[in-house]
Amino acid sequence: MRILFCTDTYPPQVNGVSVVTALSVQGLRERGWEVEVIAPRYPEGDADIFGPGVSHAQVTSIPSVPLPGYRDIRLAAPARGSVRDVVDRFTPDIVHSATEFVIGRMGQRAARDRGLVVTTSYHTDFAKYTSSYGVPFLRGPVQRWIRRFHAHAARIFTPSEPSRQDLLALGLTDVEVWGRGVDDVLFHPSKRALALRQRHSLGNAFTFLHVGRLAPEKGVDVLLEAFRQVEAALGAEHVKFVVAGAGPSLEALRAQAPKNVTFLGNLDRTRELPALYASADAFLFASTTETLGLVVLEAMASGLPVIATPAGGVADNLRDGARHWAERRTWAMELDRLDASYRELLRPAAR
């Protein structure tokens, strides 16, 4: 069985979609699938967030340019011929479009022209982003664009029940909740490291942590203002705030941040990030636009209390007894479900 992933974001780019897509590729290969990927070409020298030793499928890289104002996002060239050539050479049984942009659309079109099974992911609620970026009048057109794109899929995968309900409200069908997994071995309280706290001068201060892309829709400015008030109430020597991640809002957030806030940028996902989670004392997350909020599950698996906005996919997972809840959301279980779902779509009756 062969599956082709068509995505506009993939490692070394760092975001929830690239992480979930790479984990899907790796997990399906381990379950006997032949997998290839079409993704944007990234600048040489960009570090892979998964670190060394993680095997990925063959990747066909499409030339790309940085998005103006957000250079970490790459805009792929409309290389329809290259995508068609990969489909014809690889002859996949399924083409999965992980994103609704250039490469995702080209893969979907090539698959439809050849009568192949098409599946999609709905990872990002772009309609809600319109308010964060000051263009709320675009919410309706964005919703119609999302509906048109996913209407061609035999099955749509989305990581939370609220996002599933959003898609059903748009008139879409066969929407499966999938992808709310976490590696509860990689992210574990035992990874707590005194050396890490010393390296970042945390001392005995109560340390808040935020991990994620630094962009307007993430609400990190709200967290900084809240931390400023906590710092004023408790004293600067008693509290710290560590922010891991990068994005277009980084410099503005640095300028806004109190003295006791440390910005670390993007970290190696397998070596540095687990220790950072486990070495903090509480996790903060203010986004209201998430379909999942993968970092919330990772923080819970690391044993952290989570202070977050109960909206969208985050509300699906905010539970007391954080570590116990995360243990029921392992990637191994989710990947078994994905494997079974794809196999079901390939049965003659389903097709």
Image: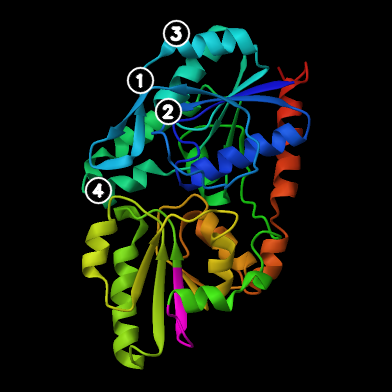
- x then y, percent, for residue 161: 57, 50
Q: Relative to residue 88, is residue 223 depicted above or below? A: below
Q: Which residue is mark 2?
A: 41
Query: Which residues lie in the magenta part?
Result: 201-209
Q: Which residue is mark 4?
A: 133
Is label 3 in a helix, a strand or a loop?
Answer: helix
Q: Relative to residue 48, is residue 228 depicted above or below? A: below
Q: Which residue is mark 3?
A: 81
Lower position in the chain sequence, tag 1 or tag 4: 1
Q: Is residue 345 left or right of residue 113?
A: right
- x then y, percent, for residue 105: 44, 22
Q: Is residue 107 left or right of residue 348?
A: left
The residue under label 3 is which amino acid type?
Answer: Gly
Give the residue displayed 24% in from the left and 58% down from the top.
Answer: 251
Lower position in the chain sequence, tag 3 or tag 4: 3
Measured Cα–Cα span from mark 3 to mark 2 = 16 Å
Give the residue displayed 40% in from the left and 85% down from the top.
Answer: 239
Q: Relative to residue 133, is residue 317 depicted above or below? A: below
Measured Cα–Cα span from mark 3 to mark 1 = 11 Å
Q: Relative to residue 176, is residue 118 depicted above or below? A: above
Select label 4 or label 2 by which is in front: 2
Per the rendering, the mark at residue 77 is 1
Tag 3 and tag 2, C-beta contact below 8 Å: no
- x then y, percent, for residue 107: 50, 19
Measured Cα–Cα span from mark 3 to mark 4 = 34 Å
Give the residue displayed 51% in from the left and 41% down from the top.
Answer: 18
The residue under label 2 is which amino acid type?
Answer: Arg
Instruction: Choose top left, top right, bottom left or bottom right for residue 234.
Output: bottom left
Measured Cα–Cα span from mark 1 to mark 4 = 25 Å
Select label 1 or label 4 by which is in front: 1
The residue under label 4 is which amino acid type?
Answer: Tyr
